[in-house]
Image (spheres, helix red, strand yellow):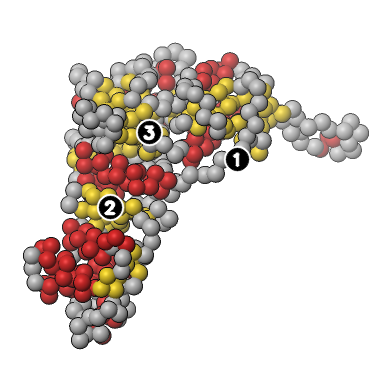
């Protein structure tokens, strides 16, 4: 018995959709899940969800068959299996399982006992999760004084009371250099205050057996305690890490990618990867060899003015990255490796709170947006054997999980991710020991040796 109107399919949730060559990106912002649909699945999706209206499955089969210029019975099995895959992923509603279709006299492929059909054409690939969302920012009263910063567009005021010693104080100078642009009216207030040790009553009978608490640093965010430590180095680390994380969480402009960035005469390269992938080590080493430093952790990526629908159509299409020259987060092992490969560090250069002042790199700090000419995914488990290009589909799946604010950026963010993967070359490169990898990346940004 042929299908009738009881069998229908329609959109199940609000998703963002963007083309990726002949594939289709479908992003579920609620679940932070990216699906990549192959050409067949993309055709089924576009027919099944057109204008958000429910459609009969038989109608979908006919439309897909017409788009491929084949008889309906040649695509029926794949269409039904694909719709079932969409339904199981929560992307559509109203679609019957393959077993239900078969029992009704439909034309779905034979499935398992649980009704799940198999097909040579997969409905699509599921990408990585980007478990980064936008946090709510508490209202803050900005006290007088302090150091006003703009990290990723979030207005922040850092107050240190009393002043840190000379070494720790030096780290606030590059932070203050990030201050730029008008006051946004949205402020985060961070206070790092030295608290004296608690007083002990002089007549305490257990005094000689009591461990006296040391003076400690208290870090507060908008008046709420965020951490405490008695170690100076840990205090500055907490301040840098937590205020940076707050800025990333609050970013609602541009697409923020977990990446280090350096630039040369040809443009900028994004060095993207998971924590401990070696991004900052590669970024710092390139900076020491003459590349301009833009950031080591959070890259603000956007369409260049006039490009991809921008206001000035006279400019060539492209994507650019906005400098965010925060102190680099490095381990001592990274410093030692760079000393061995690039050369000894100048006397007096040390990590403060696990961070390095960008001024010590020597290649300069970028202050203007730079066009993105490449994306590199470092792999420090193997040596460099060349730049290994990735096709747009695996590139999108790899990069999606490294975008801090993809759900918050919505449709525009998904389209920008697609544009990045289709207009900019994406490479994997081995970085074990750094040898070879430095020259390969320098070639991308136009630095010749």
Residue 414 vertical position relative to residue 71 in the rendered view, above or below: above
In the rendered view, does 88 fall on the left or right side of 82?
Answer: right
Asked whether the beta carbons under mark 1 and mark 2 sit within 8 Å of each other, the answer is no
Work out whether mark 1 precedes mark 2 in sequence or the reverse, and give the earlier one: 2
Q: Which residue is mark 3?
A: 300
Q: Which residue is more in the foreground, 48 or 102?
A: 48
Residue 285 vertical position relative to residue 9 in the rendered view, above or below: above
Question: Residue, x 85% and y 35% (percent of image)?
Answer: 207
User: For the residue labelled by badge 2, is the local secondary structure a helix, a strand or a loop?
Assistant: strand
- The part of the image, by quadrant, that contains residue 271 is top left
Q: Which residue is mark 1?
A: 138
Work out whether mark 2 precedes mark 3 in sequence or the reverse, and give the earlier one: 2
In the rendered view, does 138 fall on the left or right side of 305?
Answer: right
| Residue 311, numbered label | none
Work out whether mark 1 precedes mark 3 in sequence or the reverse, and give the earlier one: 1
| Residue 25, numbered label | 2
Residue 244 vertical position relative to residue 10 in the rendered view, above or below: above
């Amino acid at each position: 018995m042929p299908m009738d109107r009881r069998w229908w399919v329609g959109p199940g949730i609000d998703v963002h959709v963007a083309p990726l060559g002949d594939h289709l990106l479908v992003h579920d912002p609620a679940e932070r899940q990216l699906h990549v649909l192959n050409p067949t699945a993309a055709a089924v999706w576009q027919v099944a969800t057109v204008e958000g209206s429910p459609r009969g499955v038989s109608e979908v089969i006919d439309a897909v068959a017409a788009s491929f210029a084949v008889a309906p019975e040649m695509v029926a099995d794949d269409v039904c299996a694909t719709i079932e895959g969409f339904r199981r992923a929560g992307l559509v509603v109203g679609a019957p399982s393959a077993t239900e279709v078969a029992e009704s006299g439909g034309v779905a492929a034979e499935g398992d006992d649980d009704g799940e059909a198999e097909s040579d054409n997969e409905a699509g690939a599921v990408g990585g999760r980007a478990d980064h969302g936008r946090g709510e920012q508490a209202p803050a009263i900005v006290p007088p004084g302090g150091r006003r910063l703009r990290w990723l567009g979030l207005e922040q005021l850092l107050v240190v009371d009393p002043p840190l010693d000379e070494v720790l104080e030096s780290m606030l100078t590059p932070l203050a250099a990030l201050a730029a642009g008008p006051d946004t009216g949205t402020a985060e207030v961070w206070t790092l205050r030295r608290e004296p040790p608690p007083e002990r009553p002089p007549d305490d009978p257990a005094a000689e057996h009591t461990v006296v608490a040391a003076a400690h640093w208290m870090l507060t965010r908008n008046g709420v305690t965020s951490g405490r430590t008695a170690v100076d180095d840990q205090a500055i680390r907490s301040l840098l890490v937590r205020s940076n994380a707050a800025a990333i969480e609050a970013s609602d402009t541009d697409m923020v990618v977990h990446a280090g960035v350096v630039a040369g005469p040809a443009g900028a390269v994004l060095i993207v990867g998971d924590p401990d992938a070696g991004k900052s080590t590669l970024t710092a080493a390139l900076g020491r060899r003459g590349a301009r430093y833009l950031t080591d952790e959070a890259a603000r990526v956007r369409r260049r003015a006039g490009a991809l629908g921008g206001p000035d159509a006279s400019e060539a299409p492209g994507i650019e990255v906005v400098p965010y020259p925060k102190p680099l987060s490095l381990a001592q092992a990274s410093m030692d490796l760079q000393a061995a490969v690039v050369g000894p560090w100048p006397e007096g250069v040390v990590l403060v709170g696990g961070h390095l002042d960008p001024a010590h790199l020597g290649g300069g700090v970028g202050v203007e947006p730079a066009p993105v000419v490449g994306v590199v995914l470092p792999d420090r488990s193997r040596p460099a054997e060349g730049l290994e290009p990735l096709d747009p589909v695996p590139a999108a799946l790899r990069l999606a999980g490294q975008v801090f604010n993809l759900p918050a950026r919505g449709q525009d963010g998904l389209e920008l991710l697609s544009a990045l993967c289709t207009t900019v070359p994406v490479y994997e490169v081995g970085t074990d020991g750094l040898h070879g990898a430095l020259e390969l990346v320098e070639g991308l940004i136009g630095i010749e040796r």
